[in-house]
Amino acid sequence: MRVVQIYTSSDFSKLVLCYGPAQAEAGVEVEEVEKDLDTLDEQAQRAAVAADAPELGALLAELRANLAEVRTRVGPLVKEV
C-alpha cells in the first residue's frame, strides 16, 4: 500500500533559507567539511567528481575532441616551420 501526501506552499512557510550574514541572524550554524579525495582510489575519485560536477565529463570529452582536431590541423604546420 502506498500513501501519497500532497503538500502546498503553506506547508513550507516555516522553511527559511538564508546565506551569509542572515545565517547568524537566524541562528543557523554552518560547518564546512573538506573532502579528502587523496585517500580514495582513482575510480572513487572519478565518482566523487562526477557527483559534484556532472558537466565535467562532457567538457572533458569536448576538450579531447578539440585537442585532436588541433593536433591534426596545426601539427603539420608546425613541422613545416
Image (spheres, rainbow, N blue to C red):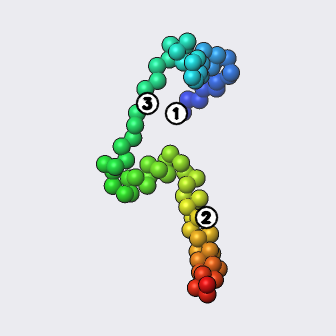
**Mark closer to the chain start, 2 or 3:** 3
Q: Taking 51 as reference, is 81 above or below it?
A: below
Q: CA distance from mark 3 to mark 1?
A: 40 Å
- Which structural element holds mark 1? loop
User: What residue did someone put label 3 on?
Assistant: 32
Q: Which is nearer the eye, 6 or 23?
A: 23
Q: Residues within 10 Å of mark 1 (few under 14, many from 20)?
A: few
**Whether residue 75 can be seen here:** yes
- Which structural element holds mark 3? loop
**Whether residue 72 can be seen here:** no
Q: Residue at x 52, y 33 (%)?
A: 1
Q: Residue at x 59, y 64 (%)?
A: 63
Q: Residue at x 55, y 54 (%)?
A: 56
Is mark 2 in CB contact (under 8 Å) with mark 3?
A: no
Is mark 3 in CB contact (under 8 Å) with mark 1?
A: no
- Left or right of 52? Residue 67 is right
User: What residue did someone put label 1 on?
Assistant: 1
Residue 36: give x, y in percent of width and height: 36, 43
- Left or right of 6? Residue 47 is left
